[in-house]
Image (spheres, rainbow, N blue to C red):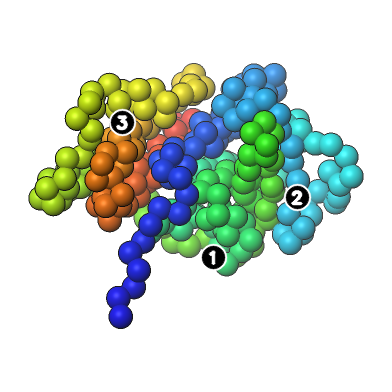
């Protein structure tokens, strides 16, 4: 008996791009004193949405002694919480960044202790922001959920335990993986007799989606190598979506799943590299 073919668990755009990517960088820039609180509030409002709330997952313990219980919360509370847990965390190029991008999808596990509620939440949503702690075996993670299309509800999870050993890529390695995966997928799709993009204006379709994936902007001073890698991921993500919107799109999942994984690798690598470059 053969196992079922994997499918895209989330919508395609959630698999290929999340505003959490850009929000992680804005948050990191603020933590390192490169932005004012007003600027980070404006950035989160533009990137994620106009209204935000913060809750603490009851199954993760409450690192804030119930401070947020029973009252409305917002972005200022979120930023204060991140500042509090990272205040004594080590800061160097060799240490884990104060914040990081966590993505999950078929073939990918988030950089969090396995089996924890935080890891499960990232798998369920597809994206989250990891937050460092002075204790190397404690990782916090913020997971957003859109409520009623207007409110971004952030849930704070505290996870304990060693983080799974993950392969660390340089921007050059991640870019190579992305290019090789793209070439392999294109060759396999062609060999199957499929046309990977619609006949009507594929370049315009890819360009329009690239604009979608690439918005909104990034904080000033992000490493050019990181920007280039995220831009290439935007283009590949757009090609994947255009391919799946073609007449044969649903039959291409088994070709596109490895490519979507390469896109996620590129994005997490780009964010990690940008955060480390701040310390050089």
The outermost residue toward the front is 247
Residue 196 seen anywhere in this rendered image of the structure = yes
Residue wearing tag 2? 56
Q: Position of residue 175 (x, y in %)?
A: 27, 39
Q: How many other residues sit within 10 Å of disc 3, few (<14), some (14-19) or many (≥20)?
A: some
Q: Is residue 158 left or right of residue 178?
A: right
Q: Which mark is residue 235?
A: 3
Quadrant of the drawing holding the C terminus: top left
**SS of the residue under disc 3:** helix
Work out how far the residue at label 3 is from the one at label 2, CA to CA, in angstroms.
Answer: 36 Å
Q: How many other residues sit within 10 Å of disc 1, few (<14), some (14-19) or many (≥20)?
A: some
> Does label 3 or label 2 sit earlier along the sequence?
2
> Does label 1 or label 3 sit earlier along the sequence?
1
Quadrant of the drawing holding the N terminus: bottom left
Q: Position of residue 211 (x, y in %)?
A: 39, 22
Query: Nearer the viewer's eye, disc 3 or disc 2?
Result: 3
Work out how far the residue at label 2 is from the one at label 1, CA to CA, in angstroms.
Answer: 20 Å
Which residue is painted at 61% across and 64% down in the image?
116
**SS of the residue under disc 1:** loop
Query: In the rendered view, would you say 256 is above or below 76?
Result: below
Which residue is painted at 27% across and 56% down in the image?
254
Q: Position of residue 263 (x, y in %)?
A: 35, 42
Q: Is residue 230 left or right of residue 124?
A: left
């Amino acid at each position: 008996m053969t196992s079922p073919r994997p499918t895209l668990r989330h919508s395609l755009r959630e698999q290929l791009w999340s505003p959490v990517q850009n929000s992680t960088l804005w948050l990191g820039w603020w933590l390192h004193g490169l932005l004012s609180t007003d600027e980070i509030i404006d950035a989160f409002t533009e990137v994620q949405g106009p209204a935000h709330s913060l809750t603490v997952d009851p199954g993760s313990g409450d690192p804030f002694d119930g401070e947020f219980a029973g009252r409305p919360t917002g972005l200022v509370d979120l930023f204060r919480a991140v500042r509090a847990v990272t205040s004594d965390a080590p800061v160097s190029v060799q240490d884990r960044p104060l914040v990081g991008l966590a993505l999950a999808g078929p073939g990918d596990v988030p950089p969090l202790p396995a089996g924890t509620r935080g890891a499960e939440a990232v798998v369920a949503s597809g994206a989250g922001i990891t937050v460092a702690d002075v204790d190397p075996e404690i990782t916090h993670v913020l997971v957003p959920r859109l409520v009623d299309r207007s409110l971004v509800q952030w849930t704070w999870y505290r996870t304990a335990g060693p983080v799974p050993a993950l392969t660390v890529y340089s921007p050059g390695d991640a870019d190579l993986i992305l290019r090789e995966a793209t070439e392999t997928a294109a060759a396999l799709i062609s060999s199957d007799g499929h046309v990977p993009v619609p006949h009507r204006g594929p370049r315009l379709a890819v360009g329009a989606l690239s604009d979608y994936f690439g918005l909104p902007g990034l904080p000033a001073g992000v490493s050019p190598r990181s920007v280039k890698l995220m831009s290439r991921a935007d283009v590949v993500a757009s090609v994947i979506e255009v391919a799946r919107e073609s007449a044969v799109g649903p039959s291409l999942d088994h070709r596109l799943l490895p490519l979507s994984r390469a896109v996620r690798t590129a994005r997490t690598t780009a964010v990690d590299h940008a955060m480390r470059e701040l310390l050089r």
